[in-house]
Amino acid sequence: MFSFQCEPDECYLLIEQLKKDNIVRTHGGLLKSQKNAFSGKEFLAWVVEKQGLDKERGIEMGQTLLDHKFASPPKAGELFKGGDEIYVLTEEIGPDALNAGGVSDCTPKTATEIGELLRKMILKLYGVFLSDDGKSVDYKGMKASEEFKTYTRMTRELTRVELTNATREEKLAFFINIYNALVIHASVERGPPTSLWGRYRFFNGTKYIIGGHPYSLQDIENGVLRANRKGVGYSYPCLGDNSAERDGTNVSILPILTLYLALFLFPNVPVTAAASKLPISACVWADIHLNVPLPTL
């Protein structure tokens, strides 16, 4: 049985209290609304009235919620203002992501810590559910297991993972390992794709929320590891033209991330095929320093 312990994040309790007091709620009208959001003005009023603190302290608390990735500002990189602007909880970003529906109540982990932990958990799962000849995986049994349920809970740590201060090597290893984990997670939850259209949807629609942003397999391969190239079926860069769109992974910070994911996963095989056709037991995982790939499963 897997176990996981962490240091509680005080901001999580703050968010829960904001929900209880209806500061976090649905904002907007009939044509456009946003669930699980709060306005800066109402947050400041709540801090003054309920917490007995001044507005300056309230601004600091609001910024801490953004820094800890419990909420996102209207535009990437904006500071907390305390006005009419609406802040959306991270759990509402990418509702179709496999780790959506909640956020971690733990102090954010580094990219190295969470990537290595998820990698080890996946390897342990395969140690239990991989056939003796290594050619098949009991995905049905894996999905029903307590170990996999623990793994899915663990993926919520990705929602607030800290990437900004990670080194180039740590980010590379992190995203390679998370790519592998995401492919496996989707194969267990949804089954492998069986058609060309299914493979396209699998590659573009399979997502994790990572550091407050949704990332699909397409985003990770072409947006992060290929320095924001246009993906299959895209007429624009995967991560957009705004260099500040994704904290800690934007190409203006990491222009040297031009390595092909296939070099680490399936040498000499197109990545689109790697993500959808070949046995997942062929995956190669990267160690945290990218010195050498770890042995194949």
Image: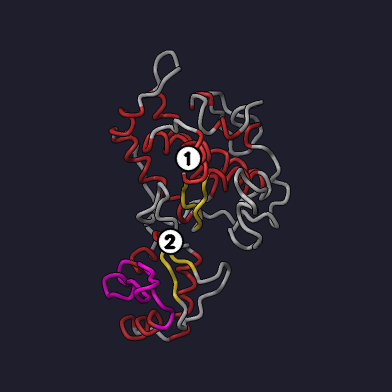
Expressed as whole percent of the image width and height from the top left, the position of residue 192 reads: 43, 32
User: What kind of colouring is applied to the model shown?
Assistant: secondary structure
Residue nearest the viewer, comparing 296 with 269: 269
73 horizontally vs 271: left or right: left
Circle number at residue 108: none
Label 1 – label 2 distance at C-alpha: 23 Å
Note whether 183 is above or below 12 in the view shown.
above
Residue depicted at x 34% and y 81%: 46
Taking the view exactly as shown, the residue that stands out farthest to the top is 133
Q: Where, by quadrant of the figure, is residue 175 drawn? A: top right
Expressed as whole percent of the image width and height from the top left, the position of residue 179 reads: 53, 40
Expressed as whole percent of the image width and height from the top left, the position of residue 124 reads: 41, 29
Element at label 2: helix
Element at label 1: helix
Q: Which residue is mark 2?
A: 90
In the image, what residue type sits under mark 2?
Thr
Residue depicted at x 33% and y 65%: 13
Note whether 190 is above or below 65 in the view shown.
above
Residue depicted at x 44% and y 72%: 87
204 horizontally vs 173: left or right: left
Q: Which residues are magenta?
A: 16-41
Q: Which badge, 1 or 2, comes first in the chain's sequence?
A: 2
Q: Which residue is mark 1?
A: 202
* 1 or 2: mark nearer the eye: 1
Asked if residue 270 lies in the magenta stretch, the reply is: no
